[in-house]
Every structure is written in C-alpha cells, then in structure tokens.
Amino acid sequence: MERLQKVIASLGYTSRRKAEELIKKQKVMVNGQIVQELGTKVEPSDIISIDGKVLNKEIKYEYYVLNKPRRVISSVSDKEGRRTVCDFVDTKERIYPVGRLDYDTTGLIILTNDGKLANHLMHPSFEVEKTYIAKIKGQLTSEDIFKLKQGIIIDNRLTKIKRFKIKHKNLEKDTSLIELTIIEGRNHIVKRIFNELHHDVIKLSRISYGFLTLDGLKSGEVRPLTIKEVKKLYNL
Ligand code: URA
C-alpha cells in the first residue's frame, strides 16, 4: 500500500505537494469516497478520482531529452502564450519537464510523464551532477576561485561546486566562459552563485545531466530516451 499523494504524483497527474493540496480541498476520492486524511494509503486496485475524473493507471510512459532554446518556458503551459518545452514534443501524453531551466537558459532538459522518475530525479537526496557553461561578465579573481573551491553560501545553505574550469577569457570584452558542475537543483542557482561573486551571467547553458549529454541534438531538437537510459536514470 502506498500513500495517496505519492500514487497521484507517480501517475503523472501532478506533483506530490499539489496532490496534498487537492486532498486537503477534498477534491480526491478513493472508490467513490472523498478522502479526509492526508496519510491515506491506497492499494493498486483502488479507483482514484480527482474532481470526479478517474485517473488512468494505464499510462504509457514516455521520456525525452530536449535541447531547449532561449525564450522558452520550462512548464506545461504559459498564461502569456510563450512557447513551452512541451511544445517541442509531438505526443498526446501529458508530459512535463523534470526541474526547470530559466526562460533565457538553453540546454538539456528531460521531459516525461513518469512521475516516479521525475520525483526520484528531483529529490534533494538524489545527487545528479549537472554541468553548465556560463558566460559571465568579468574575470574570475583568485579570491573568486578560492570561494568556488570552498563552496558558496546561498540562503544559509552551502552550495558545493563539484568541478569548475575557465574555458575561455575575452579580455577585450571583459567576459569569461566558465564550465561548472553542481548537484544542486534550486532555481537560478548558477546565476546566484556568480552573483555572490559579483559577476553577472550573460548566457547560460546546461550541457549535461548525469550521464546524458546534448550529443547530436541541435537547439530545439528532441529525442526519446532509450530504455537503457531510463533504467540508468533510475539506478544512478
Ligand atoms: N541555474 C540558473 O541560474 N538558471 C538555470 O536555468 C539553471 C540553473
């Protein structure tokens, strides 16, 4: 038996937190009964409905990797009508991005309707390495390098930098290209790291996520993950 909110999230309907809100608002029924308690557990044979709609347990799971262009939003839909990462995938399934990249950030993002994998990958204890290339204003000083090696405190939490290297310096334009690998998934984390060092991020791209890279994917291109890759993501 599993907790109701976990089951709803793993069916890809919504996040676990939002499922909890729906339960609190008494919008969720199990076998025709409104659920009153957050801790309710369900069996695989139980029929779960939200707002009167039965959740389909026979979802065909799909997994994609997209090379996200700039000016694309990392969500399922956008009130302002901007392009979303989901617009790049031709499917009828209700897929969504795993985590998010900023509107102006490019690069690798996973899309799926497998809530279990998405939760697994986004859980803070799941230390997947993400590598970014940041074009920053200015040059890293020896003090900046020292701080990056120590880790940067953001909102009272130490953000460790697994690896970093200066890929290129443009002294004329006073910009630098820095490759850095982190395990953190907090919003705007790379920009916040550099802001702590007083460097603006001019461009940002995620070039890898765990073992996945952008090899063979041009900007705006998407490909399905292989079964082997999905298994590897589960086992990372
Ligand atoms: N860090 C950022 O600042 N932005 C992103 O899009 C991803 C990581």
Image (cartoon, rainbow, N blue to C red):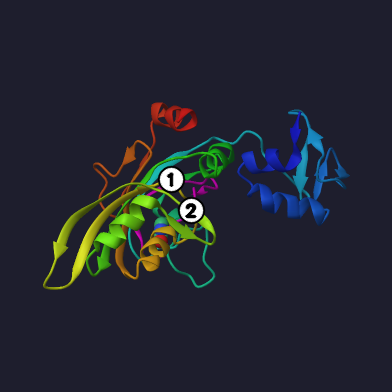
Segment tinted magenta in the rendering: 91-109
Image coordinates of residue 40 in percent, x first then y, are 82, 39
CB of mark 1 within 8 Å of CB of mark 2? Answer: no
In the image, which disc is placed on residue 183? 1
Whether 47 is drawn above or below 141: the answer is above
As drawn, the residue found furthest toward the left would be: 172
Left or right, 158 with reference to 180: right
Q: Is residue 51 visible?
A: no
What residue is pinned by disc 2?
158
The mark nearer the N terminus, 1 or 2, is: 2
Q: Main secondary structure of the magenta part?
A: loop
Residue displayed at 78% across by 33% down: 42
> Quarter of the image holding residue 171?
bottom left
Residue displayed at 40% across by 66% down: 196
> Quarter of the image holding residue 214?
top left
Give the camera-side residue of 227 and 38.
38
Image coordinates of residue 99 in percent, x first then y, are 49, 51
Q: Is mark 1 on a helix, strand or loop?
A: loop
Q: Which amino acid does label 2 sit on?
A: Leu
